[in-house]
Image: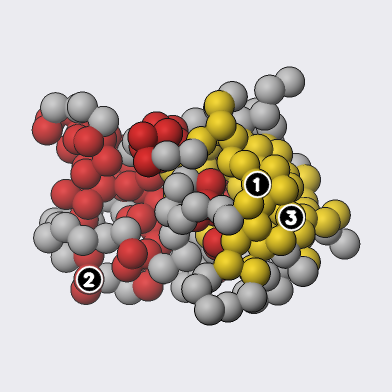
């Protein structure tokens, strides 16, 4: 079986700091919901960012969808096929209205404005935010922003989901609805979460420790 995402012996350090990743290796298979665990600062978010090209490893290789990914052109395709929900939703929301934010991705994929808006409304309904279309993103609660960011990713119908702490700032009801939705999705996903409720989604779990991927306890 060909892996969707492969990380081979990857090392990475931020300027002036020790390596946060030091020989990390993992693979995501079709249909998997892979839990990526580890302490704060272990490099989980860094690894997700490298997978979509928001940074380049100092050593090792990123492969996605059967090809090595090196330059920006390679990663543009990866970002079209991988939906990445950032840990901080403010990093993803920048339009004047919720509908525009969620429709932004489909528009960039070549959808007509009408098609993109239809996709955006459907995605908002799926995350429980129907009726939020004209709301101003920066005025939303933290949990609402997180759901809007997820809707923006789902509207692009990606092949893989990279989810960084998706339940943070959600109340119990919203968390239950989100996890129920994720459980129904066909996409393979890498799920970073400290939330034990989210761990129930995982088909397999690994952890980052001392810059390497190890079996999760």
How many discs mark residues in the rendered view? 3
Residue occupying image coordinates x 53% and y 79%: 16
Q: Earlier in the sequence, mark 3 or mark 2?
A: 3
Front tag of 3 and 2: 3
10 Å crowding of disc 1: few (<14), some (14-19), many (20+): some
Residue occupying image coordinates x 50% and y 52%: 56
Q: Nearer the viewer, residue 175 or 7?
A: 7
Q: Is residue 67 left or right of residue 54?
A: right
Q: Can residue 47 be seen from the camera position used here?
A: no
Q: Earlier in the sequence, mark 1 or mark 2?
A: 1
| The C terminus sits in image quarter | bottom right
10 Å crowding of disc 2: few (<14), some (14-19), many (20+): some
Q: Is residue 165 left or right of residue 95?
A: right
Residue occupying image coordinates x 21% and y 61%: 94
Image spot of residue 116 (x, y percent): 20, 34
Residue occupying image coordinates x 16% and y 65%: 136
- What is the spatial separation of the Cα atoms under label 3 and label 2, in whole angstroms? 38 Å
User: Helix, strand or loop at disc 3?
Assistant: strand
Image spot of residue 45 (x, y percent): 55, 62
Question: Which residue has dot 1 on it?
Answer: 60
Question: Which residue has dot 2 on it?
Answer: 138
Image spot of residue 51 (x, y percent): 53, 46
Is residue 113 depicted above or below 124 in this figure? above
| The N terminus sits in image quarter | top right
Marks 3,2: beta carbons within 8 A: no
User: Helix, strand or loop at disc 2?
Assistant: helix
Which residue of the protein is positioned furthest toward the bottom in this rendering?
A: 16
User: Helix, strand or loop at disc 1?
Assistant: strand
Location of residue 74 by image quarter: top left
What mark, if any, has residue 23 been given in the picture?
A: 3
């Amino acid at each position: 079986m060909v892996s969707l995402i492969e990380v081979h012996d990857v090392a990475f350090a931020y300027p002036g700091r020790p390596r946060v990743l030091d020989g990390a290796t993992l693979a995501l298979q079709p249909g998997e919901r892979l839990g990526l665990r580890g302490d704060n600062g272990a490099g989980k978010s860094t690894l997700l960012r490298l997978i979509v090209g928001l940074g380049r490893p100092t050593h090792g290789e990123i492969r996605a969808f059967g090809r090595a990914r090196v330059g920006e052109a390679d990663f543009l395709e990866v970002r079209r096929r991988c939906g990445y929900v950032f840990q901080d939703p403010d990093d993803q929301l920048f339009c004047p209205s919720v509908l525009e934010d969620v429709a932004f991705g489909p528009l960039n994929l070549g959808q007509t404005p009408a098609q993109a808006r239809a996709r955006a409304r459907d995605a908002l309904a799926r995350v429980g935010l129907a009726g939020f279309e004209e709301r101003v993103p920066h005025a939303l609660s933290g949990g609402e922003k997180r759901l809007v960011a997820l809707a923006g990713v789902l509207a692009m119908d990606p092949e893989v989901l990279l989810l960084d702490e998706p339940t943070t700032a959600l109340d119990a009801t919203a968390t239950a609805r989100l996890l129920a939705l994720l459980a129904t999705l066909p996409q393979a996903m890498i799920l970073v979460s400290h939330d034990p409720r989210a761990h129930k989604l995982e088909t397999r779990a690994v952890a980052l420790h001392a810059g390497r991927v190890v079996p999760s306890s």
